[in-house]
Image (cartoon, grey):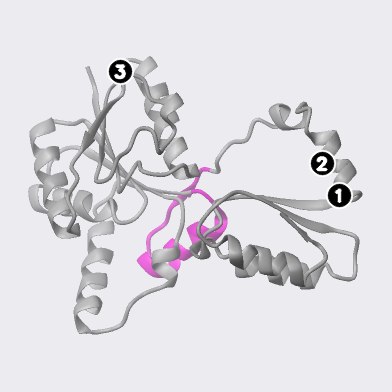
């Protein structure tokens, strides 16, 4: 049986990347693959518990320090004898890159990058400069890099000088257009709108909402936002200051 390791920094929250990871793992299991999801932070009832069944093997390493987690991932991969290793998001790419660089094992590696906040918010200093240089080198050991959007792909090209492929997250449109809530939403908005569904967190580029509001302020187009997160006060402030932002 083919063995696949899925590496993710945590399964502690309900986000798009976490949901996609679980759904992909479940689908691969139905196709006959042996799947291990290796994480550093996990709480079944805080994430998509309704999607996690007893057949889904989650390896919770629970290391408080990042370097200890890196080393724990490397040791777990060495013991696992995997045919494919998939690193999801940053910094899961670091331990997988180290593993590939140190042991030159005959195993395929993929890095799936869903967001580039860590690329856009680099820290300064000599030590961080060395770390980022090492990180760029490690990324070159991956057989494949996958981005979820053109924006993410361009950021990877500019920073890592690597060429990713783009695989956009799918949306089952029929489930949305057939929803009982859609007529009510259309009635409330009363015109055309842009719809944003995301966790309300600063690193999701919430500033873009204000730019959109200003861009469309002379039209009837509204920006409709759905989601929850730690930066709700910021979003509420935007809603109060711009008549065309609706939460």
Q: CA distance from mark 2 to mark 3?
A: 38 Å
- Residue 7 magenta: no
Front-most of residues 129 and 242: 242
Query: Mark 2 touching mark 1, by CB under 8 A?
Result: yes
Identify the residue at image location x=31%, y=23%: 56
Mark 1 or 3, nearer chain start? 3
Identify the residue at image location x=81%, y=63%: 244
Mark 2 or 3, nearer chain start? 3
Instruction: Tell me the magenta residue range.
Output: 148-167
Mark 2 sits on what residue?
185
Q: CA distance from mark 2 to mark 1?
A: 6 Å
Badge 3 element: loop
Q: CA distance from mark 1 to mark 3?
A: 43 Å
Q: Quadrant of residue 216?
A: bottom right
Q: Nearer the viewer, mark 1 or mark 3?
A: 1
Q: From the viewer's perspective, is residue 128 above or below residue 192? A: below
Q: Residues within 10 Å of mark 1 (few under 14, many from 20)?
A: some
| Label of residue 189 in the image | 1
Q: Residues within 10 Å of mark 3 (few under 14, many from 20)?
A: few
Identify the residue at image location x=91%, y=49%: 190
- Residue 157 magenta: yes
| Image x and y of residue 5, in percent | 25, 34
| Label of residue 110 in the image | none
Mark 3 sits on what residue?
55
Give the left or right position of residue 89, taking residue 186 as reference: left
């Amino acid at each position: 049986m083919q063995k696949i390791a899925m590496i993710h920094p945590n399964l502690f929250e309900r986000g798009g990347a976490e949901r996609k990871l679980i759904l992909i793992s479940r689908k691969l299991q139905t196709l006959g693959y042996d799947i291990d999801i290796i994480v550093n932070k996990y709480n079944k009832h805080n994430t998509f518990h309704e999607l996690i069944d007893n057949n889904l093997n989650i390896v919770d390493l629970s290391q408080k320090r990042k370097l200890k987690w890196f080393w724990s991932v490397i040791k777990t991969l060495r013991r696992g004898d995997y045919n494919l290793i998939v690193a999801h998001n940053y910094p899961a790419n670091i331990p997988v890159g180290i593993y590939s660089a140190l042991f030159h094992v005959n195993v395929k590696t993929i890095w799936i990058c869903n967001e580039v906040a860590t690329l856009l918010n680099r820290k300064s200093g000599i030590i961080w400069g060395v770390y980022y240089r090492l990180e760029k080198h490690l990324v070159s050991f991956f057989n494949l890099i996958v981005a979820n959007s053109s924006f993410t792909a361009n950021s990877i090209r500019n920073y890592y000088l690597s060429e990713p492929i783009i695989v956009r997250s799918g949306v089952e449109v029929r489930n949305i257009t057939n929803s009982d809530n859609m007529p009510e939403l259309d009635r409330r908005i009363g015109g055309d709108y842009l719809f944003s569904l995301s966790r309300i967190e600063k690193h999701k580029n919430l500033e873009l909402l204000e730019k959109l509001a200003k861009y469309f302020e002379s039209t009837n187009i509204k920006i409709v936002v759905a989601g929850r997160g730690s930066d709700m006060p910021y979003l509420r402030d935007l809603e109060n200051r711009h008549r065309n932002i609706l939460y």
